[in-house]
Image: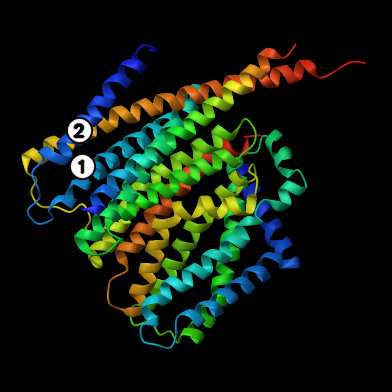
């Protein structure tokens, strides 16, 4: 497993570079939006990657609740962190695309709003982890993660109905996709997914390291405490 | 009568009795909600015709903030008197305690809503143009949505630093679909322009999903330290 | 268009910020591990 990390790192960098090159220069310019539409080559793959890592967090949280395996908890927190990073990218690039295309920074459309709620839920998850003391923190965090995951279909559904009643411009909107664009999309998604796995792996290893360190530290302090006089 | 129901009943009766004597939670909730109503009416002119469109949002924000006041003190008494430790070593099912607490909060917030409803009608000159009776299921389902998750997250935030901040921080994002439904349903009924039926069904779904989730996970959370 | 550059730049700034958070975490862990090892 340890050998996989540097191999992946070496693969990811040129893949990212190549995907960027394709996004900027190879993909054809959009008829209506011109060059600025190229933002979606970063915006949409980041969204897909964020969803994948939030799903990893959900599965790891359930595994932790059932088995109480600390490695599952490390997977959960790493997945949440990487998901939040990619979700932030989505929320920043979205308005930067909307402004020149639609003339507005933000709209409460289905996709942006549900992404914002997703971001809020997982940031609250990370804040809960930071603010909870005690070794039962992973249990509480996993419970919250399950709640968050249960919530997301309801979030999406409620905003969808809200938007069918009060339609607004849709960011990341429809229209047919030029097959050449799809190819660049998938390429960028593959590149970002590999990059995501890299930082996920790093975060996971760091979390395990931290746990080992804390165990050793508490053992040390236990041994140092004078028990009998 | 099973032990669960009798525990729930006993705990609920105790909480209501204590609250009736002190009226702590109700008074602070009432005053808070009143303040929110008055401050909002400075920002939005409630007399104007458009007020019917935004009244739903204002009402539910006021109730939400007031509910947080109630939820924050849910477990305070239990913590002070080490009741939770005693409960953990007893064979009593944890769900009975949770249900009692959630029902207690539900009753307190419903009392608040009943007291505030005439006030809202007066301050904002509300006259529902749609089927007014639908406001009752909206209020019941909406309040339960806030209270069931709120009681659960209040139990989680016991273990955190800055307890009072943690509860709304955790509660608000998760409650967004329910809040959207409550506000849209209230607006639909007040303006009479759309049907509130979808929102009521959504609230029912939300309530069912999260009541089950809370009942399944509360034991785990309560036994955490 | 400048929005395009801003979007790509923002993406990488966000990723690099997270990488530096991970790096700082690693440095702190290494420091504490060294402190444990040098204890008598």
Q: Which residue occupies the extreme right position in the image?
A: A229
Query: Where is mark 2, residue-wise?
Result: A19
- Residue B131: name its quadrant: bottom left
Residue B143 drawn at (x, y percent): 49, 62
In the structure shown, which secondary structural element does the residue marked by tag 2 occupy? Answer: helix
- Residue B160: name its quadrant: top right
Say whether residue A209 is left or right of residue B200.
right
What residue is at 75 percent from the left and 20 percent from the top? Answer: A221
As drawn, B216 above or below B71: above
Query: Where is mark 1, residue-wise?
Result: A41
Q: Nearer the viewer, residue A83 or A146?
A: A83
Q: Nearer the viewer, residue A173 or B115?
A: A173
Disc 2 and disc 1: Cα gap in Å?
9 Å
**Circle 2: is it few (<14), some (14-19), or many (20+) Cα within 10 Å?**
many
Residue C25 drawn at (x, y percent): 53, 29
- Are dots 2 and 1 in contact, CB under 8 Å? yes
Residue A77 drawn at (x, y percent): 47, 32
What residue is at 46 percent from the left and 33 percent from the top? Answer: C20
Tell me which label, 2 or 1, sits earlier in the chain: 2
- Answer yes or no: are tags 2 and 1 on the same subunit: yes
Asked if residue B99 shows in the view, the reply is: no
**Circle 1: is it few (<14), some (14-19), or many (20+) Cα within 10 Å?**
many
Location of the C terminus of chain B by quadrant is: top right
């Amino acid at each position: 497993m340890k050998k996989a990390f540097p191999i992946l790192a070496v693969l990811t960098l040129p893949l990212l570079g190549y995907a960027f090159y394709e996004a900027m220069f190879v993909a054809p310019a959009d008829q209506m939006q011109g060059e600025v539409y190229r933002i979606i080559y970063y915006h949409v793959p980041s969204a897909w990657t964020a969803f994948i890592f939030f799903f990893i967090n959900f599965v790891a949280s359930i595994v932790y609740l059932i088995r109480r395996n600390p490695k599952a908890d490390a997977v959960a927190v790493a997945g949440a962190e990487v998901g939040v990073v990619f979700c932030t990218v989505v929320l920043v690039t979205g308005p930067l695309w909307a402004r020149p295309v639609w003339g507005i920074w933000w709209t409460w459309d289905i996709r942006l709003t549900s992404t914002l709620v997703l971001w809020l839920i997982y940031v609250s998850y990370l804040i809960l982890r930071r603010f909870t003391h005690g070794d039962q923190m992973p249990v509480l965090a996993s419970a919250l993660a399950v709640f968050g995951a249960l919530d997301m279909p309801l979030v999406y559904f409620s905003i969808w109905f809200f938007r069918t009643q009060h339609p607004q411009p849709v960011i990341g909107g429809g229209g047919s996709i030029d097959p050449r664009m799809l190819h660049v999309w998938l390429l960028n998604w593959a590149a970002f997914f590999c990059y995501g796995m890299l930082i996920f792996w790093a975060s996971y290893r760091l979390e395990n390291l931290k746990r080992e360190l804390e165990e050793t530290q508490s053992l040390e302090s236990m041994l140092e405490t004078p028990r009998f006089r | 009568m099973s032990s669960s129901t009798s525990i729930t009943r006993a705990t609920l009766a105790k909480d209501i009795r204590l609250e009736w004597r002190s009226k702590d939670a109700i008074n602070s909730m009432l005053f808070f909600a009143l303040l929110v109503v008055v401050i909002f009416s400075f920002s939005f002119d409630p007399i104007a015709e458009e007020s019917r469109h935004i009244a739903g949002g204002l009402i539910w924000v006021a109730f939400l903030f007031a509910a947080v006041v109630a939820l924050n003190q849910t477990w305070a008494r239990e913590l002070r008197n080490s009741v939770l430790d005693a409960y953990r070593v007893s064979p009593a099912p944890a769900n009975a305690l949770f249900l009692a607490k959630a029902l207690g909060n539900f009753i307190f917030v419903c009392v608040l809503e009943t007291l505030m409803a005439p006030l809202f009608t007066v301050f904002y000159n509300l006259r529902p143009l749609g089927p007014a009776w639908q406001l009752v299921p909206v209020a019941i389902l909406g309040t339960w949505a806030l209270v069931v998750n709120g009681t659960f997250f209040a139990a989680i935030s016991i273990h955190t630093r800055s307890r009072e901040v943690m509860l709304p921080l955790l509660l608000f994002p998760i409650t967004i679909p329910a809040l959207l439904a409550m506000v849209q349903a209230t607006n639909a009924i007040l303006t009479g322009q759309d049907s509130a039926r979808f929102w009521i069904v959504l609230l029912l779904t939300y309530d069912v999903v999260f009541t089950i989730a809370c009942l399944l996970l509360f034991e785990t959370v309560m036994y955490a330290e | 268009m400048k929005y395009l550059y801003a979007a790509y730049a923002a993406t990488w700034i966000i990723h690099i910020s997270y990488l530096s958070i991970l790096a700082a975490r690693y440095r702190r862990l290494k420091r504490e591990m060294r402190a444990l090892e040098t204890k008598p």
